Image (cartoon, rainbow, N blue to C red):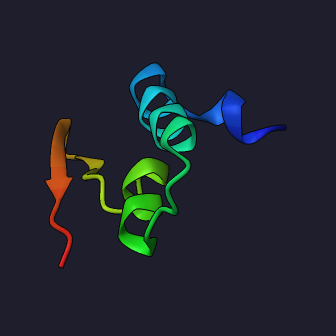
Amino acid sequence: MKLRDLLSVYDKKKLYASAVKNEKLSRKDWEDIMGVQRDTYRKVNGRIRRIKRN
């Protein structure tokens, strides 16, 4: 499976825009594109709860 198969359309646009500008992405930018800091949801007693990230 390739990286392009896993990314959303918005994330692909951000990635390709930076590639066109020929700029290097920082670690924080890569984590943002890959979704490391996205909210996590879990089902608890029939409700969907957001798990807070530190």
Residue 2 figure quarter: top right
From the viewer's perspective, tell me whether residue 44 is left or right of residue 12: left
Question: Is the N terminus in the top left, top right, bottom left or bottom right quadrant?
Answer: top right
* Residue at 48% over, 42% down: 21
* Residue at 54% over, 33% down: 16
Question: Is residue 29 positioned above or below 4 on the image?
Answer: below
Return the residue found at the far right: 1
From the viewer's perspective, tell me whether residue 28 is left or right of residue 23: left
Question: Is the C terminus in the top left, top right, bottom left or bottom right quadrant?
Answer: bottom left
Residue 26 percent across, percent down from the top left: 43, 70
Q: Nearer the viewer, residue 8 or 45?
A: 8
From the viewer's perspective, tell me whether residue 53 is left or right of residue 23: left
* Residue at 27% over, 47% down: 41
Q: Nearer the viewer, residue 40 or 43?
A: 40
Residue 5 percent across, percent down from the top left: 70, 28
Q: Nearer the viewer, residue 7 or 19?
A: 19
Return the residue found at the far front: 21
In the rendered picture of this protein, how many numbered marks are placed on residues?
0
Residue 42 percent across, percent down from the top left: 29, 49
Residue 23 percent across, percent down from the top left: 49, 56
Question: Is residue 12 positioned above or below 49 on the image?
Answer: above
From the viewer's perspective, tell me whether residue 49 is left or right of residue 34: left
Return the residue found at the far bottom: 54
